[in-house]
Image (spheres, grey):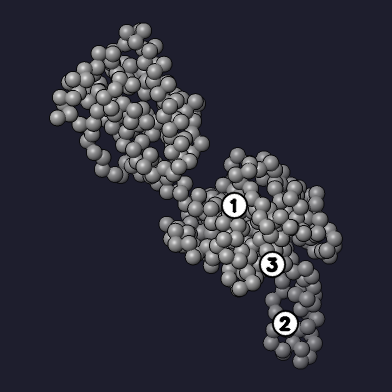
Amino acid sequence: MKTAVVFVHGFTGGEETWKNSGEVKFSTLLKTDAKLDAEFEFFEFSYFTKLVDFFSSAKFQKILKAIPLVNRIPGVTGRVKVNKPIAQLSEQLATFLSLQLGDFDEVILIGHSMGGLIVKDHILNYEPGHGPKPVGYVSMAVPHKGALSALILGPANNVNVKELTPLSEYCDGLNNKWTDQKANLPASLYMIAQHDECVAKESALPFTVPRASRVIVDHDHTSICKPFSSSDLSYVAVQKFLTDYSYKKFMHVVANGTGLLSKPDYDKEIFVLKMIVCDIGDKGMSDAKNCFFNAEIISKAANKKDMKELQSIQAKVLSLYQQKYNACNVKKLTPNEIFAEVHAEITAQDSGVLKATADYINFLHKKGLLHQLANNLRDDVVWSDTTDFNAIQTKML
């Protein structure tokens, strides 16, 4: 199923927020990437936001409706609308996601300026089952610690201007909650506009953000969300974020879906023959085959970065094997006992020395990496010092 991507504009923004000078929307540019178009569906969330909301207020609308003739002019009178606090706009976003995008399991939220604060509030208050789960957050020139321009340019009675003022109670509280929940937040990208006239660089980051999760692009506060083409680094940053998420989602499917795939019997593979000549039990061999299969699948699907991590883990697995094998030999344990001890050690170190940065690499893959190393006619990985390689070669025929 596709993942929803929702754009949320900022203070006094709207549909025009995402359009470049050629009237091309950010989402339209993203959809020109065939892979993104196949994996994601794009939406915009809009809400009422004005610098001055008096003319749509209940008081002014009441006056207009009382004036003869004027109240008959189409469009002059209308529904009452006033600026609302960010927390209420967050609830409106939650309603939109729940009712309009309820069929989606996951959503990536892209917020510009105040829109990024609305998104943060939603993520922090998200209740599982109430709309798609937030799995990604893109912060575009968002005033996490307030914006001085709000204090200088905005009318003092505007509720959002008060919230956006540096060190305001709301802005400060929201950022503190965000910082406290740092370990539980969805994957995030923080985009800083190099020439931002509204949000200082220090405010565009909620806390110390790793370099890999932040970018500075050659834009101002409003142009950052209006990329002119697919070569614009503002576009490239979002495109890469979505592509990376899509890859990780695919790898989770690969890592967890092998049980549904038919597996080769591997009976002529050397790592299996090494177990056979050492009389390893059927259950142990079955587990080894399954782990080998998982390691083969994940290795073939991995990108360059993950492949390097798998190779690093494999080297550690080999080291653990050698240490445990040597200790077991001193105790004169049987091949079956050595086999069990080695695999127990790998499982025990799954979240220790073998911990992977990619959460879809699990202990099954790590045990499988050992059997990949055993799949040759060398004695790098064996279960007995007296392994009969002649017998193995005969069984290979």
Element carrying mark 3: loop
Name the kind of residue labelled 3 in the image.
Answer: Gly
Q: Which residue position holds label 2?
A: 77
Q: Residue at x 45, y 42 (%)?
A: 304
Observer-nearest residue: 47 or 151? 151
Instruction: State if disc 1 and disc 2 touch (CB < 8 Å).
Output: no
C-alpha span from label 2 to label 1:
38 Å
Judge left or right: residue 303 versus residue 161: left
Name the kind of residue labelled 2 in the image.
Answer: Thr
The part of the image, by quadrant, that contains residue 114 is bottom right
Name the kind of residue labelled 1 in the image.
Answer: Tyr
Element carrying mark 2: loop
**Of all residues shown, which one is farthest toward the bottom?**
69
Residue 317 visible to the viewer: yes
Q: How many marks?
A: 3
Q: Is residue 90 above or below residue 286?
A: below
Compare marks 2 and 1 and give the one earlier in the sequence.
2
Residue 272 visible to the viewer: no
C-alpha span from label 1 to label 3:
19 Å
Judge left or right: residue 340 versus residue 308: left
* Mark 1 residue crowding within 10 angstroms, few (<14) / some (14–19) / many (20+): many
Q: Which residue position holds label 3?
A: 13
Compare marks 3 and 2 and give the one earlier in the sequence.
3
Q: Residue at x 28, y 32 (%)?
A: 289
Observer-nearest residue: 248 or 62? 248
Q: Which residue position holds label 1?
A: 137
Judge left or right: residue 52 versus residue 237: right
